[in-house]
Amino acid sequence: MIPIFEGLKDNVAKISTLQSAASKLLLGCLALLLLAGQASLVSANDTVAAHVDEHLLRESLSLKGDWRFMPGDDMAWASPTYSDAEWEVRRVPGRWERPGYPEFNHMAWYRLTIQLDSNLVASDQVKSLAIRTGKVMSAFELYAGGELVGKVGQLPPLGDINYDRQRVFVIPASAVDAHGRVVLAMRVWGGPEPLVNAWSAGPSGGEFRFGEFAPLLLKGVVGELPGLLFAVLIFAFGLYHLYIYAQNKVLVSYLWFGLASMVIALYGLMLTQWKFMLGLDFGTLKKIEFGAIYLFPALGIQLVWAVLKIGVPPWLRMVQVAFVMFSAAVMLIPGQNVNFYTLHYEQFLALGVVAYTVYVILAETRRGNPEARSVAVGTFIFMATCVNDVTIDLFHIETPRLSPVGFVAILLAMAVSMARSYTSMHSELEAQVADRTAELSDANEKLMRAASIDHLTGLLNRRGFTDEVSQEISRSQRSGKQFSIVISDVDHFKQFNDQYGHACGDHVLRRVGELMRDRTRDVDRVARWGGEEFILMLPETDSEGAAVLAEKLRETIADNVFEYGGERLSLTMTFGVAEYRKGETLDACVARADTALYHGKERGRNKVMIGNYKGLTLVG
């Protein structure tokens, strides 16, 4: 058509003399040009499919639409100078009509011409051109400017199918001709006869885009992330429920839920491009995918009936066995033909099971089964997605597969139902525990008090003192009022044990505890810190005030005479004082007081030392 039009353009005066047929041909050409929109004349042989400027290249150009198509196989068709004007137009993506092209061994070519803007041709951006291919059944080679830039699978005579792989291929700058044209040619093999008869062939889905390499690659990775996230989350979901079952074998529904979730996660991973990261060949990946999807109905039956708490009828057990056999067949029988032969049978059987499951759920709902209502919504959604996906396989409708959505819906429904069942099962136990807790609360409180008291002196022990100080720290942070810590130690305490026995030492400790408790305020807290060490917390008291009290205690104890076994004994104590600093821990404050105590003992004992910001201060 285009050569005739160019000839007419050079001699407009002769248009009126053309015959009627030529006039109709000219009008047809004009109409074609108007409909093409961006189409323009390039040469006597080729039509430009799209013009690409810098902005469009950066955003990437969708190649979804009309390509030139020719069944057969001739390597001359890869040449950019070959004329495809007489080829028919086919949509990409779009599968072939059955039975494909057996007369050409199911081989065919697609061609598309892209015109780059002159500014792009003169820039370095032509060095980063790339094309992202969608899914092509069952293998293909891609040429740009007559050069092979990449392939997926193997074309005959090797004939290795790989119809799920999506790739980003670099287009060399040499593929762009002097006029800025890039001629893309895709050599496609439909696959073996059983596959073509079952699913047809050709570009079956995904995105075909033209642009810069890095953005195309990044978009491909980002686009596959939701699928990976879905698989990981569902797998973790299943693992969690298996863990719950391992802790309590009574929860059988959690076992089936966990197994079903992990099978769904595996299937979800097989639907993404991430599966190729596993390093397995395409045939093995497909067997895993089909094995998982065939096994799920058997697990789904077990799960639903377990959640509903009803028995599985014998005939349905046989159906479960059939699904398991389907799964085993695709996994164990070599080659991919078993996939093509069994898929439709498995799908129809699965639809029947889903329909029967809906009937059972409705019947259980009428009987008042509380779990049936929760399961119903998810099952209905799952059935709708199954119908959608079966329709895609049967009629090759170009619409997204929704089975992952259905899987999520039914898993969520099952999770809600199991959570409700779990709550109901434990409600009585919780009531019993509540009653028992009420009975034990008083005893626990007494035990807690006992656990906070030093049995020898009757003072707080380390644990009780720590709890009290924690509360005081909270009050101090709210009010801004400080408090102080005083730690003390009986000087030469070991001599009492050595000379008079441990009973004497215990008597001394009890007496010291009584003196400290009697000479402190009610709001103060006195505790035995350990051994012969005592510790005090003085609320709303700075280090100077604490030192005054410590000095009084030191004098009281030094002036006191202890009687034991007819002996009159005297003793002294050394004190370390530290004021609590806002934001520090109790351990840090006690450490400063302990350091002051240590230095007091170094200076002769029977001393009061303050550990403040500037260092150590001796009192008195």
Image (cartoon, rainbow, N blue to C red):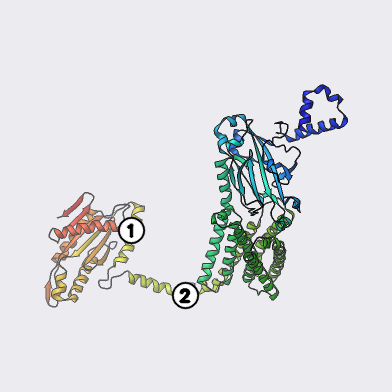
**Residue 271: image location, x then y, percent:** 61, 55
**Residue 477: image location, x then y, percent:** 35, 53
Which of the 4 quarters of the picture holds residue 446? bottom left
**Residue 79: image location, x then y, percent:** 67, 38
The quadrant of the rendering that contains the C terminus is: bottom left
**Residue 354: image location, x then y, percent:** 70, 65
Q: Residue at x 12, y 60 (%)?
A: 604
Q: Secondary structure at mark 2?
A: helix
Residue 386 shown left or right of residue 514 in the figure: right
From the viewer's side, name the closer residue of 212 and 154.
154
Q: Secondary structure at mark 1?
A: helix
Q: Residue at x 70, y 74 (%)?
A: 315
Which of the 4 quarters of the picture holds residue 360? bottom right
Residue 416 shown left or right of residue 46 in the figure: left
Which of the 4 quarters of the picture holds residue 565? bottom left
**Amino acid type, mark 1:** Glu
Question: Disc 1 marks which residue?
Answer: 472
From the viewer's side, name the closer residue of 174 and 400.
174
Q: Residue furthest top?
A: 13
The answer for how far apart the CA atoms under marks 2 and 1 are is 33 Å
From the viewer's side, name the closer residue of 607 and 51.
51
Q: What mark, if any, has residue 547 been given in the picture?
A: none
Q: Residue at x 59, y 29 (%)?
A: 119
Q: Residue furthest bottom?
A: 565
Question: Disc 2 marks which residue?
Answer: 436
From the viewer's side, name the closer residue of 288 and 450.
288
**Amino acid type, mark 2:** Arg
Q: Residues within 10 Å of mark 2 (few under 14, many from 20)?
A: few
Q: Residues within 10 Å of mark 1 (few under 14, many from 20)?
A: some
Q: Is residue 94 visible?
A: no
